[in-house]
Image (tube, helix red, strand yellow):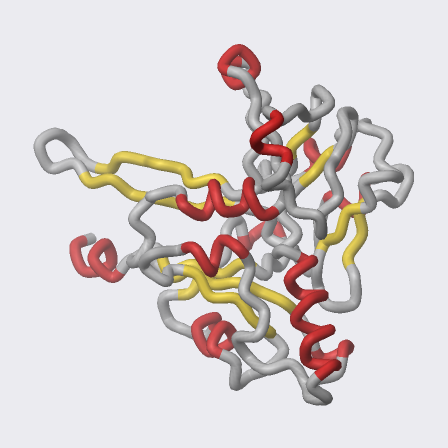
Amino acid sequence: MEKAKIQWGMTIDLDLCIGCQACTLACKQENNISFVSQKQAKMGRIIEWNQVIHTVKGEVPYTKLRFLPRLCNHCEQPACTKVCPVGATYKNPEGLVAQIYTRCIGCRFCTVACPYTARYFNWYTPEWPEEMKKSLNPDVYVRTKGVAEKCTFCSQRIRAAKDKAKDEERELRDGDVVPACVEICPTKARLFGNLADSESRVAKLSRSPRAFRLLAHLGTQPKVIYLSERAWNESE
């Protein structure tokens, strides 16, 4: 699999998502995302690269709870990269919207430009209790205060899968790269893979009649594709 032929993407089946937020916790653990105090949470300073939005539809007693996982959509035409004055965020050849944390100056233009509100700002230097420091992932940079951060599709796992394939003298196979949120999902609502490979599972699901993209009319061309709920389609 040549690098130029890779376009990483993800599908999320809303019919399978149960809103357990295991993806949120797995993402925090994998990517060294700091926890904030209750006071800071009330000020809207929570940092969650993977967030599950809960909404209620219908009137009592016929209400139904719906879930919408939200993360960086790694757009083909990302708005965030166009407004960064120092080039701290950019789109790499494999379709990932990457972030150079050491270059970020904290102006938060990218946060404002992102239509998916998927970027978060580090207001304080992260601190962890002594017993939690040993659980930090050594493969992931610990962000300091004053920088914007977001989902990376677990780029460290992508790199590890490539290294393993190289050591075994083979090409990357579909399913070799499994981000933390995909691995932890108890209902297998998420799939990750190469959208440029028409035979990959994620590419096939992206062509499903149920497939849609958030705010597609903005022309950002997200690489996170949602699959609508069958039950809702039948009842509405």
Quarter residue 15 falls in: bottom left
In this rendering, the answer to whether 32 lies above or below 59 is below
> Seen from this angle, which residue lies furthest left?
61
Quarter residue 161 falls in: bottom right
Q: In the rendered picture of this protein, how many numbered marks are placed on residues?
A: 0
Residue at 63% across, 78% down: 196
Is 153 or 167 nearer to us in this picture? Answer: 167
Is 44 or 80 nearer to us in this picture? Answer: 44
Could you say where residue 106 lies in the image, as x and y percent from the top left?
81, 28
In this rendering, the answer to whether 106 lies above or below 72 is above
Residue at 33% across, 52% down: 17
Residue at 46% across, 60% down: 183
In this rendering, the answer to whether 90 lies above or below 172 is above
Instruction: Locate residue 132 relative to residue 182 in the image: left or right.
Output: right
Instruction: Locate residue 80 relative to residue 153 in the image: left or right.
Output: right
In this rendering, the answer to whether 39 lies above or below 44 is above
Could you say where residue 153 lies in the image, as x and y percent from the top left?
62, 56
> Seen from this angle, which residue lies furthest top?
39
Classify the position of the N terminus by image quarter: bottom right
Could you say where residue 226 lies in the image, as x and y percent from the top left?
44, 58
Could you say where residue 159 lies in the image, as x and y percent from the top left?
72, 65
Residue at 82% across, 45% down: 100
> Seen from this angle, which residue lies furthest bottom?
169
